[in-house]
Amino acid sequence: MNAKPNQPLDFDVQRIRTDFPLLGRKVHGKPLVYFDNANTSQKPLQVIEAVDRHYREHNANVARAVHQLGEEATAAYEGARDKLAAWINAASRNDIVLTSGTTQSMNTVAYSFALPRLKPGDAILTTVMEHHANIVPWQLVAARAGATVKAAPINERGELILEKFFEMLTPEVKLACVTHVSNVLGTVNPVREIARECRRRGIPLLVDGSQALPHRPVDVQALGCDFYAFTGHKMLAPTGTGGLWAKREHLQSMPPFFGGGEMIREVRFDGTTFAEPPHKFEAGTPNIAGFAGVGAAIDYVQSIGFDAIRAWEHELLAYATERLREIPGLRIFGEAAEKEPVISFLIEGAQATDMATLLDLEGVAVRSGHHCAHPLMQFYGVPATLRASLAFYNTREEVDVFIAALLKVRKLLM
Ligand code: PMP
């Protein structure tokens, strides 16, 4: 342990950790070091208790019931929409569709927005650094329409080559899709600038916010995009929660994708009419308890504040990067000028999965694999990387444990 804790005065990470019961457990007899936060975050007591309380005290279905419990469940569910709307500065709460996560949000845009607009010869533009959720839905609808999916290139540092992206915004492109933050590289894309160029050409822009919302304040109106998709479980909330923000005019014009209860105005065999957005896109019973947890997650993050979270996470990122660079034969993938706390790497001569398996025996949870980003792996010419992804509840001491474990494992495999 050659580092001295150097915590900002206003950031008491040890106190924060007491809110996360899982962080106190042991794995294979060793204290857990959880560095797989980009995969899913751990949950604070406040979120766990909100879900628990929902089932103990308020459980009922939303919208359908006029009884007290139904009203309480609806208040929790709709309350999450209000909090999300305020959090990402949506112009209206009705511009937020609640979904099971980014994947559902993307597919909603693919089938309700892109597919009806695509003609043979059209294209959707995405980038080489995207998660499969921001590639495969576009491929599915493009194939149906006789359209194609194009991918803008990145440089070796893992940054989008903006000039190329802008060059590729040609008239046949009917939708552009870009991640705000890469789940593999940590790269932060200049979404405002991209949105400006898309607007100049009249091309709608979808932003994948999955890895951005846990780390930075987001203002969808200031970004100037058309769609912003996100997931709850990476930002302290339960799995199976997420959302899609879209400009009102798009939500109005999009036909629904899922049909069923809750999304209709009147059902008739001679013509069904649909509810107004966002309900038009929310067929069936949603993850009500999960959204009670979303509300609690937002309250929790706000109680700490992004200024403190960002300062701490960036200190950890810098420290972990510096310590990793001390390891001989270690290559970092993703050295963009602006990054969030995600570090992908490989050590020469060692398989990523072997390393992750041995690290697990040391209590260190990192992800190994392609991270649902095959095209990015193809770009770097590797089948897999190891990825350490940090959160504000991680510590410098955990980075030290991680580095010591890496050195031990490296020795075993060399
Ligand atoms: N996009 C990115 C950048 C992601 O990191 C993830 C989750 N790994 C997704 C999309 C998909 O999110 P979900 O599985 O929650 O739908």
Image (spheres, helix red, strand yellow):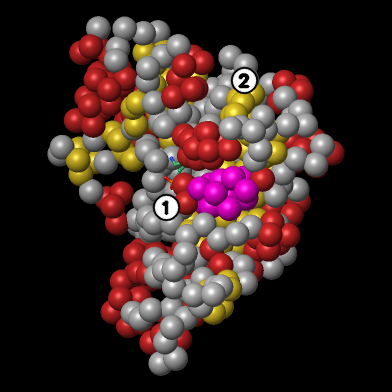
Q: Is residue 216 above or below residue 46?
A: above
Residue 76 appears in the picture as rendered: no
Magenta-highlighted residues: 105-116
Of residue 3 and residue 359, the one placed in the foreground of this image is 359
Q: Residue furthest bottom?
A: 67
Dominant SS in magenta: helix
Q: Is residue 376 above or below residue 361?
A: above
* Helix, strand or loop for disc 1: loop
Residue 375 appears in the picture as rendered: yes
Of residue 75 and residue 270, the one placed in the foreground of this image is 270
Give the label on residue 233, or none.
1
Give the image location of residue 295, x and y in percent. 49, 67
Q: Which residue is mark 2?
A: 154
Q: Is residue 248 above or below residue 368?
A: below
Identity, as a three-letter code, of the amino acid under mark 1: His
- Mark 2 and ligand 1: say if the CB distance to the nearest ligand atom is below 8 Å: no
